[in-house]
Image (cartoon, helix red, strand yellow):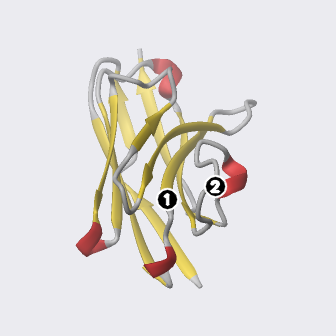
Amino acid sequence: QVTLVESGGGLVQAGGSLRVSCATSGRTFSTYAMGWFRQAPGKEREFVAAINWSSGSKYYADSVKGRFTISRDNAKNTVYLQMNSLKPEDTAVYSCALSPRLGSLITRSGAYDYWGQGTQVTVSS
């Protein structure tokens, strides 16, 4: 079993920065990728960023490219999402996810088997 716990969400003004973290525990040795997704009220869940755990390759949604950075700490089994130049439209519940499936399309939510509970990020205008 794998457990993911997010932290670091909160309220920030537009243009500000925030870092959210996702600590994993359990059978994490089979991790293929970690991803961040977000869901705003009344909207579908959308891909934000992902990282291939072995190669370190990173992937971003066009809407956050250049503003958000995904990173990892292998020793701590933790993945981070640094969010800069935040906009009101970034307001959402941010969830991290873990994919154990080699070769899966990690920009899609269907690739992930394990999810955190989510953390609220609110950007005021």
Residue 84 numbered tag: none
Mark 1, Cα crowd under 10 Å, few <14 / some 14-19 / many 20+, is: many
In the image, what residue occupies the spot 58% across and 69% down?
A: 100
Q: Which residue is mark 2?
A: 104
Using the numbered discs, state the Cα–Cα distance from disc 2 to disc 1 in whole angstroms.
9 Å
Q: Is residue 21 left or right of residue 43?
A: left
Q: Amino acid at mark 1?
A: Ala
Q: Secondary structure at mark 2?
A: loop
Q: Amino acid at mark 2?
A: Ser
Q: Secondary structure at mark 1?
A: strand
In the image, what residue occupies the spot 36% across and 56% down?
A: 55
Contact (Cβ within 8 Å) of mark 2 with mark 1: yes
Closer-to-camera residue (59/4): 59
Q: Which quarter of the figure is the N terminus placed in? A: bottom right
In the image, what residue occupies the spot 42% across and 22% down?
A: 124
Q: Position of residue 79 (x, y in %)?
A: 36, 58
* Sooner in the amino-acid sequence: mark 2 or mark 1: 1
Q: Position of residue 76 (x, y in %)?
A: 27, 73
Q: Which residue is mark 1?
A: 33
Give the number of callouts. Answer: 2
In the image, what residue occupies the spot 58% across and 40% down?
A: 38
